[in-house]
Image (spheres, grey):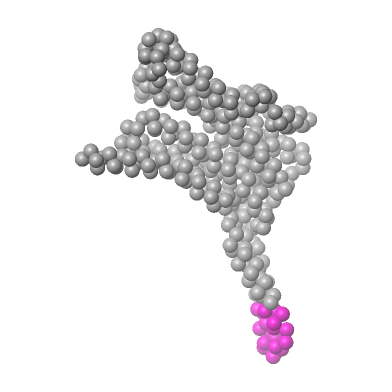
Amino acid sequence: MAQAESDEKRRSKSRSHPQPYSPSWVNHLTAWVDRRSWPSWSWYLGLWLILVIVLVAALWIEGVHPVGKVFPAQLFMPAMIALFLAMIHFLDNRAEAALTTLRPALKATEEEYDQLRYQLTTLPAWPTILASLATMAAIYLIGFLTGETDSALEALAGSPIAATLVWIVYWIGWWVFGAFAYHSIHQLRQIDYIYSRHTRICLFAMSPLYAFSPVTALTAVTLAIATYGWTALNPDNLTNPVSIALILLINGLALVVFAWPLLGTRRMLAKEKAQRLDQVSLRLEGVFSQMHERIDRGEIEGLEDLTKVMSVLETERDTLEAISTWPWQPETLRYLVTALLLPLLLWIIQYVVQLVVGS
């Protein structure tokens, strides 16, 4: 309830300023969920259960499968619809929280901040629709050229009513995925824009700069979940080098999704660090010059003070050199790489063990 009130206050505040575009159907959906009294996750879980019940009940009623028999794929397709919608909602909330954390380091007025928040958490209406249509068109074209889509869906259905329902859920899934893909591109671009255009860099106050790395990491993990979920339903893919290469390619893409919006900040941090180190080096050079002049003149007194100054500057230099210019916590990258590679590694080990035992 408190979350819903907070979201309503946020929307009321945003209405006080003209917004650059109308919100998408996804934002209307998440706003509707936020106004409900139940936790948001329960609505997406309920959506998944409803879709599963409708698909499975059709097969049972028509007698295609005995009551109680469920194909994993009939659970997976509705799960992907619910997952992508839930992750858009969750990522928007996390992105807004990250922007709040970054606020002390932002060079933005209150009105500019409100615009950044809106663009970060709101998709434009028509581009979102076009992205979903483009995704569906691409999938249809691939299926038409290869014929794999028809055979896969026929295996899931087996009767006219069930086949129609499977087709509907299948295309809803690609519609939602298109929205999620566009959401990822849009939000990650906004993160890059916020970092590169509105963020004040301070090497000794790095915590706010880590704010968006969990958002990009979660986006990458969501992409990997869909890939590994489909692979789990089709384990034979792991015997196909092309499928393994595709999984590795998607994992590489997930790493790009994680790092790309943050690389601009990394460059700014590296530039700031280099400038600060250059300043320290120039000061050290000045101290050494003074020491040499005094030594040449035989003025030993005062060298201890210069030595103390040099020690302070060396400490500053060592401190600067120890500062990482990567805008994420080390454990964030470690957890992400583990999430991306561990399932694939376990499957490869299992496959090798089966080959050894079978031989």
Q: How many marks?
A: 0
Asked whether residue 20 is in view, the answer is no
Find the residue positioned furthest to the bottom.
Answer: 298
- Above or below for 97 versus 179: below
Find the residue positioned furthest to the right.
Answer: 16
Which of the pair 207/1 is nearer the observer? 1
* Residue drawn at the location 31% of the way across and 39% of the way down: 351
Q: Quadrant of residue 6?
A: top right
On the image, the x and y values in percent for residue 236 come to 32, 32
* Residue drawn at the location 36% of the way across and 30% of the way down: 234
Q: Quadrant of residue 248?
A: top left
Which of the pair 237/126 is nearer the observer? 237
Asked whether residue 347 is in view, the answer is yes
Image quadrant occupied by the N terminus: top right
295 drawn magenta: yes
Find the residue positioned furthest to the front.
Answer: 68
Query: Magenta stretch?
Result: 287-307
Which of the pair 112/354 is nearer the observer? 354
- Above or below for 42 versus 201: above
On the image, the x and y values in percent for residue 19 come to 72, 30
For this view, does 187 lie left or right of residue 170?
right
- Above or below for 357 versus 296: above
27 drawn magenta: no
Image quadrant occupied by the C terminus: top left
Which secondary structure dominates the residues rendered in magenta?
Answer: helix
* Residue drawn at the location 76% of the way across and 29% of the way down: 12
On the image, the x and y values in percent for residue 242 come to 34, 37
